[in-house]
Image (cartoon, helix red, strand yellow):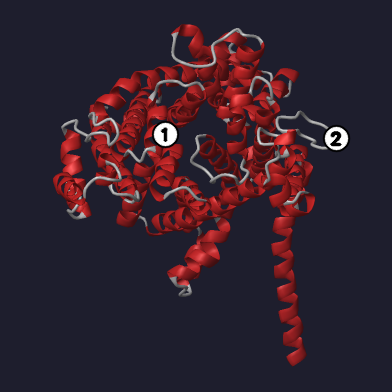
């Protein structure tokens, strides 16, 4: 008897986990078929590896920061693959250390935006009525301020450092996520399985966490990927106008801004960090587009 | 319809007040004593106290904000900490340059984006389609300030064809406008393509073809008119990113607009100037969106009928 129940339980968990796995493996299977998305994923993996092992590849203090007047403004060579900048620092070394900053700011900023924007959007969509109205009107006001201006104002007010930069970019992308989460919660919340959960007495929190969020996840994943791209662009933009990460820390936008004065004779200082940004954003966009198609195949029709 | 327009115009008021509140609150956190920024670090304490009292810096936040709002309604955004001139006049005098750049960028985006999008959609999966989609993907992935520098490198430094900065005549505007417009052109291209693809599969297009309407007319009249509706909204929203992007573009090309004014002001901790710049640009964006929404209602009879 006991063993009978046990087998039954075992069987039911088995089918459950199999079903769960198959849903995501189905998404993965579709994503794998998309060559462009896979190219994006490969580029991103390489970038993440370069960022993680940046210290192993090139020492931060000795190669990326230390100035060396003897080798300033050199073009690409065997010793310095991508040349050196106006202070004689190796550009490749600075770029892989810069990748750390860009990826970190991108991910942290988007996490802040998803956390705050997602919560606000979920509350607005789930409760509707007055709460929805207040939150969304507030978001409308936020959306009226172009996000880069908002980020500039926040960094200007709070002061220039890495944390404030992540905060500024994160906060300025809150409204987008609030809107997306709200929209997907609205489509999910009136479906039968939510009603069923409510009928058996599940609390609002449980319904939101267990039933609504997992079903509203797809658009957030897609927007999150594209959001990281946007955040990296904003970081570079803020650094470019001198409001990003304080010097001498290498950051792509700041690096290419430093190269401006030497555009005539040493354009590689400006070209390479810019290419790094383009490749990163391109990879994120490819992956984001691929994820959109893989998560919601209906859209592809 | 008039009711709808009136409602949208009235909605502009709370949004504008909200924008001033958010930006004012953020700038309120700026460290540093405005009195000291104005009088210099070695000013005698007595004068500092006097100025703080005069500026109302000792009042609670909400009182200060109320006073700011009251003055702002009358067009008085305070005086610059560094030049001591009214900031509104300064922002207003710089604004035409920013607007000129933004409109030129938008024009480039539309002139490229819509035709390329249409061709891509009508010749789906052709070589032309693939090439333009790859270019569009590159366009959205490129930071505009870098594109600007690369254009300077090619057209000003290497070829010597176009000026690399300043606002002096038509030729000086070409590079900044391309720099600013490229990203939006890419977005509009992709949007036009997908919108067209959706429309040309509709029954009414098949009907038009079946009754023998020429293909050119089917595309330009029957399809484009319907495909344009979602594009209009995108254009409205992109105007905001153009205004934001103008801040960076102005810095690349030493363009004398609000964006550069604002960045300089941030570095000098000139809070009134920053406030006025951000509010001015945001209100412009809101007005553009209002116009776009009204235009949208005219284009789409389904919306018009909702409000008549």
Q: Nearer the viewer, residue B16 or B73?
A: B73
Visible in this render: residue A30?
no
Secondary-structure class at tag 1: helix
Q: In what quadrant of the picture does the N terminus of chain B appear?
A: top left
Above-or-below relation of B152 to A64: above
Name the residue at 55% across, 22% down: B179
Coordinates of residue B71 in the picture (x, y in percent)? 16, 37
Coordinates of residue A50 in the picture (x, y in percent)? 75, 48
The answer to whether A1 appears left or right of A139 in the picture is right
Secondary-structure class at tag 2: loop
- Badge 1: few (under 14), some or many (20 or more) residues near its Cα, within 10 Å? many
The answer to whether A69 appears left or right of B218 in the picture is right
Above-or-below relation of B20 to B219: below
Q: Which mark is residue A78?
A: 2
Q: Which mark is residue B263?
A: 1
- Cα distance in 3D space between marks 2 and 1: 39 Å
Q: Nearer the viewer, residue B191 or A77?
A: A77
Name the residue at 43% across, 49% down: A159
Q: Residue furthest bottom?
A: A1
Quadrant assignment, res B98: top left
Quadrant assignment, res A119: bottom left
Coordinates of residue B239 in the picture (x, y in percent)? 43, 27
**Which chain letter matches label 1?**
B
Q: Given this view, does label 2 or label 1 mark the residue nearer the observer?
A: 2
Above-or-below relation of B63 to B279: below
Q: Which mark is residue A23?
A: none
Q: In what quadrant of the picture does the C terminus of chain B appear?
A: top left
Quadrant assignment, res A280: top right
The answer to whether A135 appears left or right of A188 in the picture is left
**Which chain letter matches label 2?**
A
């Amino acid at each position: 008897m006991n063993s009978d129940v046990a087998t039954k339980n075992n069987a039911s968990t088995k089918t459950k986990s199999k079903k769960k796995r198959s849903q995501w493996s189905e998404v993965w299977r579709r994503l794998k078929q998309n060559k462009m998305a896979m190219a994006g994923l490969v580029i991103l993996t390489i970038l993440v590896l370069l960022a993680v092992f940046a210290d192993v590849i090139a020492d931060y203090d000795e190669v990326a920061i230390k100035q060396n007047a003897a080798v300033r403004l050199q073009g690409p060579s065997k010793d310095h693959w991508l040349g050196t900048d106006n202070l004689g620092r190796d550009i490749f070394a600075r770029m892989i250390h810069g990748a750390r900053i860009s990826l970190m700011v991108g991910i942290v900023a988007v996490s802040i935006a998803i956390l705050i924007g997602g919560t606000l959007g979920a509350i607005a969509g789930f409760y509707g009525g007055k709460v929805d109205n207040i939150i969304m009107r507030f978001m409308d006001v936020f959306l009226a301020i172009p996000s880069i201006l908002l980020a500039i104002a926040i960094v200007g007010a709070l002061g220039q450092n890495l944390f404030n930069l992540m905060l500024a970019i994160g906060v300025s992308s809150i409204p987008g996520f609030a809107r997306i989460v709200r929209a997907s919660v609205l489509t999910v919340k009136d479906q039968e399985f939510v009603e069923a959960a409510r009928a058996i007495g599940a609390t609002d929190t449980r319904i939101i966490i267990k039933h609504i969020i997992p079903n509203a996840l797809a658009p957030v994943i897609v927007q999150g990927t594209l959001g990281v791209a946007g955040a990296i662009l904003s970081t570079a933009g803020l650094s470019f106008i001198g409001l990003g990460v304080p010097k001498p820390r290498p950051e792509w936008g700041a690096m290419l801004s430093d190269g401006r004065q030497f555009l005539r004779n040493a354009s590689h200082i400006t070209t390479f960090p810019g290419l790094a940004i383009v490749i990163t954003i391109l990879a994120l966009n490819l992956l984001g587009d691929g994820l959109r198609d893989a998560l919601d195949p209906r859209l592809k029709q | 319809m008039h009711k709808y327009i009136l409602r949208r115009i009235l909605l502009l008021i709370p949004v504008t007040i909200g924008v001033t509140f958010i930006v004012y609150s953020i700038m309120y956190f700026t460290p540093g004593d405005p009195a000291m920024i104005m009088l210099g670090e070695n000013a005698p304490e007595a004068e500092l106290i006097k100025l703080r009292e005069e500026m109302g810096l000792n009042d609670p936040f909400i009182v200060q904000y109320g006073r700011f709002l009251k003055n702002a309604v009358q067009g008085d955004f305070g005086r610059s900490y560094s030049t001591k001139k009214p900031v509104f006049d300064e922002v207003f005098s710089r604004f035409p340059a920013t607007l000129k750049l933004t409109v030129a960028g938008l024009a480039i985006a539309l002139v490229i984006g819509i035709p390329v999008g249409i061709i891509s959609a009508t010749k789906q999966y052709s070589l032309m389609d693939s090439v333009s989609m790859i270019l569009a993907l590159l366009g959205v992935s490129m930071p505009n300030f870098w594109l600007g520098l690369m254009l300077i490198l090619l057209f000003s430094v290497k070829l010597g064809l176009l000026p690399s900065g300043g606002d002096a005549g038509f030729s000086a505007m070409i590079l900044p406008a391309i720099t600013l417009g490229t990203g939006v052109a890419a977005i509009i291209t992709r949007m036009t393509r997908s919108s067209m693809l959706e429309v040309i599969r509709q029954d009414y297009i098949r009907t038009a073809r079946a009754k023998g309407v020429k293909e050119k007319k089917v595309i330009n009249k029957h399809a484009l008119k319907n495909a344009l509706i979602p594009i209009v909204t995108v254009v409205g929203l992109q105007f905001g990113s153009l205004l934001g992007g103008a801040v960076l573009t102005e810095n690349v090309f030493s363009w004398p607009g609000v964006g550069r004014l604002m960045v300089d002001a941030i570095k000098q901790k000139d809070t009134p100037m920053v406030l006025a710049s951000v509010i001015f640009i945001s209100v412009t964006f809101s007005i553009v969106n209002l116009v776009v929404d009204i235009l949208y209602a005219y284009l789409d009879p389904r919306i018009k009928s909702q409000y008549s």
